[in-house]
Image (cartoon, rainbow, N blue to C red):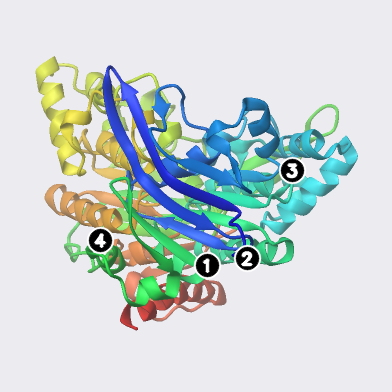
């Protein structure tokens, strides 16, 4: 038989902290053949990312160790390789797309410069040649107007656009093995389909192999040749994707296949008062060119959008990455400047300064898209969650704040005993739940939920949807729910706003938008989302 490109044999990963040894991965084995895509699936904390990081020895050593196993790349054991040998493999033969692009991109450098740097280092290209190639790569991964966006900084791009830049960087050197750790997490469904098609084409043209880590089983069904199912650090089932989906043998695999957000939100009271209303909101970013940096144009991120959210109501905002969804949410709670009228309850807040807004901050909260970037790495989870209480409810004693933290963590499904750990000790999905707990602890009236389930596996998505519903019913919360996952939006939203290029192309009740979309763009979104869902369901029912 042909030797596998990558062979993981009997691999274990352990972490040592304060004399305590925790086994994160326990004696797993799998192979990836040349030109093959193998998906590693499982819930947050199952060991998927730890396994992927072990391939290139990117864990924090010596706290991390490998009590057993080998990782053979073309017959060479990478676990015993020297640092010089690993440097030759990293970026050339094996590259990786990380889960959280904002923490992986240098905030001080333009994205084009970061791509060109890779090409200059690994391929010896000059500046001009590298820039030309970088524009080609940005075009391939679906960045609109790449000639101008190549000079953007990471903070000037949406989460989905940043993820696409990361994919372009990973593909720059045409690697033999691409490790993709949740590469479509931040992408809307239409671009998700484009990226999967792009990766599939590159795989075919260059004979590239892919280790694909995801919690989205619809993507696995559509994209992977073989699948390995992980839970609690062990691979409990593996085999050809169609076979595993059609005839799952392990109870955990069956649980994953059955898990997705279900149900519909409860009705909103007819006399529910408006909590927040935005009328003709505009957020334009100036484009400055020339030596004197004169304003020569504007990027119209939000261009005349009106939205109202009532008590106990969820308004879903959907659309492609860069359509203005997040900018709208931030403008409504006055995190960025905007033009247009915004009322919070009976108060006009559009003219208030950031200092004047402080009195309203406890009542309006936001859960950001990137949990790792929004959690301080120097603070424990307990300190992060109770920070808002110290500011907005200073009369609480230390023990009362701690009790509120325990309650908040319990509500979002995390063990309160972990509250003294730091963010880097949690998986991506667990960090997202910490971010939700931080927002909810202040008992706000209005919450902007910016992709709150994007980093969560499907079973936890369903739990979070139920959690958000329960909190809404209990406290009459108003949500602005920003998401590219239309299945989650359908389970949670009463009203839906569809945005594209900064404007609203369609708005109405969730039933109207999902069951009878009027515009071609909305129809395309629905087709992209539910074609994947249909494929998944057909596989389960076979």
* Residue drawn at x 15%, y 54% as measured from the top left: 473
**Structural distance between the alpha carbons of marks 2 and 1:** 8 Å
The C terminus lies in which quarter of the figure?
Answer: bottom left
Secondary structure beneath label 3: loop
Q: Considering only vertical position in the picture, is 379 above or below 522?
A: above
**Structural distance between the alpha carbons of marks 3 and 2:** 25 Å
Secondary structure beneath label 1: helix
Task: Provide residue 72's location: percent of width, then percent of height.
Answer: 56, 45
* Residue drawn at x 25%, y 37% as measured from the top left: 437
Quick check: can you spot residue 513? Answer: no
* Residue drawn at x 69%, y 30% as measured from the top left: 109
Label at residue 223: 1
**Structural distance between the alpha carbons of marks 4 and 1:** 21 Å
**Structural distance between the alpha carbons of marks 3 and 1:** 29 Å
Q: Residues within 10 Å of mark 3 (few under 14, many from 20)?
A: many
Q: Residues within 10 Å of mark 1 (few under 14, many from 20)?
A: some
Task: Provide residue 106's location: percent of width, then percent of height.
Answer: 62, 30
| Label 3 sits on residue | 150
| Label 4 sits on residue | 252
Q: Considering only vertical position in the picture, is 540 above or below 411?
A: below
**Structural distance between the alpha carbons of marks 2 and 4:** 28 Å
| Label 2 sits on residue | 200
Q: Considering only vertical position in the picture, is 320 above or below 52?
A: below
Earlier residue among tags 2 and 4: 2
């Amino acid at each position: 038989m042909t030797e596998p490109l990558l062979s993981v044999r009997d691999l274990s990963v352990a972490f040592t902290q304060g004399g305590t040894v925790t086994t994160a991965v326990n004696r797993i084995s799998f192979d990836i053949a040349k030109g093959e895509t193998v998906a590693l699936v499982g819930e947050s904390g199952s060991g998927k990312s730890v396994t992927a990081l072990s391939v290139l020895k990117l864990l924090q050593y010596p706290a991390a160790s490998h009590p057993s196993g080998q990782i053979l790349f073309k017959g060479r054991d990478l676990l015993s390789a020297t640092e010089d040998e690993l440097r030759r493999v990293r970026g050339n033969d094996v590259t990786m797309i990380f889960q959280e692009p904002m923490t992986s991109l240098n905030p001080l450098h333009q994205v084009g410069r970061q791509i060109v740097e890779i090409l200059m280092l690994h391929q010896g290209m000059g500046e001009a040649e590298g820039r030309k190639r970088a524009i080609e790569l940005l075009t391939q991964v679906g960045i609109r107007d790449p000639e101008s966006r190549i000079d953007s900084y990471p903070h000037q791009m949406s989460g989905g656009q940043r993820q696409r830049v990361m994919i372009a960087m990973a593909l720059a050197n045409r690697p033999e093995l691409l490790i993709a750790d949740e590469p479509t997490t931040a992408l809307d469904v239409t671009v998700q389909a484009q990226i999967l098609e792009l990766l599939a084409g590159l795989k075919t043209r260059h004979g590239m192999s892919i280790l694909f880590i995801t919690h989205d089983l619809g993507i696995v069904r559509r994209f992977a040749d073989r699948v390995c199912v992980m839970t609690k650090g062990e691979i409990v089932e593996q085999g050809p994707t169609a076979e595993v989906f059609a005839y799952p043998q392990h109870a955990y695999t069956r649980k994953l296949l059955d898990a997705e957000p279900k149900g519909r939100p409860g009705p909103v009271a007819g006399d529910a008062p408006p909590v927040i209303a935005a009328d003709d909101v505009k957020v334009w970013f100036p484009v400055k060119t020339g030596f004197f940096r004169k304003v020569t144009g504007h990027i119209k991120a939000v261009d005349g959008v009106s939205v109202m959210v009532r008590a106990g109501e969820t308004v879903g905002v959907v659309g492609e990455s860069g359509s203005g969804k997040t900018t709208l949410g931030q403008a409504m709670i006055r995190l960025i400047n905007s033009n247009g009228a915004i009322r919070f309850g009976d108060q006009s807040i559009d003219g208030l300064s950031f200092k004047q807004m402080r009195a309203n901050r406890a009542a309006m909260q936001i859960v950001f898209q990137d949990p790792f970037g929004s959690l301080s790495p120097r603070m424990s989870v307990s300190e992060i969650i109770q920070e808002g209480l110290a500011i907005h409810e200073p009369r609480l004693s230390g023990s009362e704040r701690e009790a509120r933290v325990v309650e908040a963590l319990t509500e979002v499904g995390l063990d309160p005993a972990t509250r003294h750990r730091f963010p880097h000790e949690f998986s991506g999905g667990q960090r997202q739940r910490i971010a939700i707990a931080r927002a909810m602890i202040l008992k706000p009236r209005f919450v902007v939920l910016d992709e709150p389930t994007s980093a969560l596996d499907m079973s936890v998505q369903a739990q979070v949807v139920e959690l958000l519903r329960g909190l809404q019913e209990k406290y009459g919360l108003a949500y602005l729910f920003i998401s590219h996952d239309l299945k989650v939006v359908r389970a949670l939203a009463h009203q839906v706003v569809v945005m594209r290029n900064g404007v609203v192309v369609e708005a109405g009740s969730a039933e109207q938008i999902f069951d009878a979309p009027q515009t071609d763009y909305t129809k395309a979104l629905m087709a992209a989302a539910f074609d994947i869902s249909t494929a998944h369901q057909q596989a389960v029912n076979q």
